[in-house]
């Protein structure tokens, strides 16, 4: 089945109307989760709860059945039990709905009976040529449409990273991390049992989606592997694909077969297919998310020589260790750059890479150092340690001293200091973006302060700052980006 | 110089009175930082700001000089410039103070002149037999004394992990992480240039300190290496020591020599010395902190067979991969345990390890599953995925549906739900602690929800729950713990 569902999937990601079959007022029912998360996410289209027994659900008028809805329905989300599914699906077909997301579980993952119902379901839906996600899925999301038809209460900010997850719980946890870290996401699909729409169809859709810049895939097995890899290879030439394979080991593979009740690809083959197709392989969910942020916002490094600018010595040291251990190099600065840095830094600065600012907290010195190091022909990428976060640390110190001084209006003074310091940090980050736009080299910041602001990772025109919590995250991301650059260069799609 | 400073260091960690020389009302001066952070941290002893020009600093009476303080002073923190240091130190000696922390920088790390002053300083202090930390340090901390004489505004909660950091900025960032993650700390020393008190002296102190259960060291070089390793070996038999070596690579080592202007040990030798001495080596600051939380709170695993209990399939799969890739094994459950689990789990549970709860959210099922798997003779340690965090997710969902339903008193309803759900989570964690106390096997939780509560990692009598954000953290920590168990077993200090 080589069908391409690219057009049909628009009904699922960009619906103007959604019916929730099994919608419920009773907390902890799936029909309550989907309804309340759709409403909390701010979906602006029309929502039709379907339930034969209720009059109103969460303030919305209820319809007894799908046929009673007075207009065409783009997307139907089904949460009713497995034994109702064939009947409900026939109603969807009669109504000529645009797409279906079957959240309900209890199909092939539970045994032979479930497998048969799932096959009947797929036959029905395929004959009617309606795209269906699931069954056994956590749902779908499209931030551009403020559409969060999810079983979990999550709404990451709008951005351009789109995600396919074969595992609902892993997918949900990653959406939660994205939300916590302020990472902008575009779309999410829990692909579930994939009885009609599979990962390859969604990948194809993301490949053409103008709102998607980077694609994440968590997969345990692949049906129609040849087609999947062909689409992956075509897509990887246009947009980075970052994949995490669950079941790489024999024990992991057995666990995967046990819980999906389905296919589980041969990992070794998949691993080398990934490399040949330009798919970037991540080893952990955290890496997958971290790489995607870098890929979505930064230029690719065209070499391995890394400049390091640090607010203090120790972080510089461990970052150098990480750079070398990842097979990259600590860049050697020319005498020319060192002399220029001499003019902006305190007399006892390190006079070498890593460039140690020795606690210098002057914004001009930050910016000038980053500009000089990044524009050096001996440097391919730059990591800045601890410049971001100094403001948050400063605000907290100021707050402590304002309180100790028993200032008349501590809150006002702290707010003023916060505004001023955040303006400085924002100004620094704007300059970093400008430097990247001019040099086309990546500059990654590592924050000194986990408790700081989360308003980051904004995708704008051009490149956009990335702020990581640890140096090793920055180093590992640069290594992944450089490998991707090499792949594209080998393919001739990048000079 | 084989002197043991164990008794003398009490004046530095547990002072009844502290003088701050160079104390200041002017924000961003070191003398302002130390004063305001001491006050914000809630230090209960007497604080004497010393400044010839001020009358009052942050509400405290100022003394023109140390000699004017009307009582003995246990600890002096010096922040005045390098050219004042010898004179100020003589005043400390005349006053017969208990200990000195010299925050001031500009010594050997800046060149030959600074090196000479540092030598003169050390000679003075050594002749007077006064213990001195620094110069060029971020300060010291003792949570048991609510004493935060730090250049950075940090006050992690009280606990039993003590930390020696040769790098101020790395040390401070780790304290910030500890604070953010609710990790209980005992003591911190930025060892700075170590011209009198070195890492080996502090290690010796921590070895005997009843408030210290686990020791963290960040080091770039070691003076008196033989003495250091001898003390480390003696200490490691009593308390876990987790070390991170900065400058493991040639480039990292050069960076270290550049910023400390001092010794930098031969890494390869240090690495093997660590292993022989039972020091646990971490490769990143995050690992160092994560390992310490496990070591402080959990029993050591006595084997490599790991049980996995998961709230959903995908996390179980990637955890199995990580277990195998770390050289451990996914435990095989006996038929007996499987039959007992059959009685508490939904009919289509996985019937093997990983034990998949398939979204079951019943507290009794959680507890009973953990109890059955942990007590199995085929299991050495257990990782529980996603049970912790379900409550936070549930509260957020409930809040969304309460708002959508336009409940009369949404806040009250949400607060009631939160109280109820946190009671369930707390009850589950109490049971986990009880299971560990009975079985002496570690049970690690991985949270589904980063945005949840931080009130964790409480050291009490017996073992105490550990909650990590990712499965790989749990797996890596178990691997480190097992290696430590093997070391102790080989030494005959553990059966």
Image: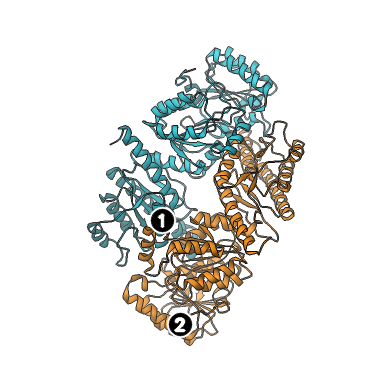
Chain colours: A cyan, B orange
Of residues B364 and A487, the one drawn nearer to the viewer in this rendering: A487
Chain bearing mark 2:
B
Residue B190 horizontal/vertical position (percent):
48, 68
Of residues A11 and A71, the one drawn nearer to the viewer in this rendering: A11
* Residue B146 in view of the camera: no
Residue at 45 percent across and 38 percent down: it is A281
| Number of marks | 2
Left-right relation of B130 to B356: left
Residue B165 horizontal/vertical position (percent):
48, 65
Residue at 46 percent across and 86 percent down: it is B127
Residue at 62 percent across and 68 percent down: it is B211
Q: Which mark is residue A321?
A: 1
Name which quarter of the figure residue A220 lies in.
Answer: top right
Of residues A44 and A439, the one drawn nearer to the viewer in this rendering: A439
Name which quarter of the figure residue A424 lies in.
Answer: bottom left
Chain bearing mark 1:
A
* Residue B228 in view of the camera: yes
Asked if badges 1 and 2 are on one and the same chain, I answer: no
Secondary structure at numbered mark 2: helix
Look at mark 2 in the image and give the residue it sits on.
Answer: B125
Residue A445 horizontal/vertical position (percent):
39, 50
């Amino acid at each position: 089945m080589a069908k391409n569902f690219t057009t049909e999937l628009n009904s699922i990601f960009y619906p103007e109307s959604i019916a929730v079959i099994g919608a419920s007022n009773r907390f902890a029912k799936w029909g309550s989760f989907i309804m309340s998360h759709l409403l909390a996410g701010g979906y602006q289209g029309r929502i039709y709860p379907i339930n034969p027994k209720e009059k109103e659900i969460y303030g919305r008028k209820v319809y007894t059945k799908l046929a009673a809805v007075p207009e065409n329905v783009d997307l139907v989300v089904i949460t009713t039990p497995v034994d109702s599914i064939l009947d409900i699906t026939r109603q969807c077909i009669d109504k000529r709905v645009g797409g279906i997301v079957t959240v309900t579980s209890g199909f092939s993952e539970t045994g032979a009976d479930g497998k048969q119902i799932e096959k009947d379901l797929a036959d029905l839906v395929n004959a009617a040529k309606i795209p269906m996600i699931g069954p056994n899925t956590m749902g779908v999301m499209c931030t551009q449409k403020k559409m969060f038809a999810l079983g979990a209460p999550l709404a990451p900010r709008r951005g351009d990273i789109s995600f396919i997850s074969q595992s609902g719980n892993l997918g949900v946890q990653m959406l939660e991390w994205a939300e916590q870290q302020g990472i902008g996401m575009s779309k999410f699909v829990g692909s579930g049992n994939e009885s009609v729409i599979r990962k390859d169809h969604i990948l194809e859709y993301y490949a053409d989606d103008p709102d998607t810049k980077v694609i994440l895939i968590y997969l345990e097995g692949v049906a129609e592997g040849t087609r999947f890899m062909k689409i992956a290879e075509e897509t990887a030439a246009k947009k980075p694909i970052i994949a995490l394979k669950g079941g790489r080991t024999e024990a992991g593979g057995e666990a995967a077969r046990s819980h999906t009740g389905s296919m589980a690809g041969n990992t070794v083959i998949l691993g080398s297919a990934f490399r040949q197709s330009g798919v970037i392989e991540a080893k952990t969910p955290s890496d997958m998310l971290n790489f995607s942020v870098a890929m979505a916002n930064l230029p690719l490094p065209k070499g391995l020589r890394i400049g390091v600018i640090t607010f203090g010595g120790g972080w510089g040291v461990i970052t150098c260790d990480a750079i070398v251990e990842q097979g990259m190099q600590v860049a050697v600065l020319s005498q020319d750059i060192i002399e220029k840095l001499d003019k902006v830094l305190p007399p006892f600065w390190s006079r070498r890479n890593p460039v140690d600012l020795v606690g210098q907290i002057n914004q001009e010195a930050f910016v000038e150092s980053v500009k000089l190091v990044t524009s050096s022909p001996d440097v391919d990428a730059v990591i800045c340690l601890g410049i971001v976060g100094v403001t948050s640390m400063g605000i907290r110190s100021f707050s402590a001293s304002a309180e100790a001084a028993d200032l008349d209006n501590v809150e006002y003074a702290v707010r003023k200091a916060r505004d001023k310091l955040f303006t400085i940090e924002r100004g620094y980050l704007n300059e970093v973006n400008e430097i990247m736009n001019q040099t086309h080299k990546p500059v990654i910041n590592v924050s000194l302060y986990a408790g700081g602001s989360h308003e980051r990772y904004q995708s704008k025109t051009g490149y956009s700052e990335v702020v990581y919590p640890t140096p090793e995250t920055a180093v590992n991301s640069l290594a992944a980006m450089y490998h991707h650059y090499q792949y594209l260069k080998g393919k001739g799609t990048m000079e």
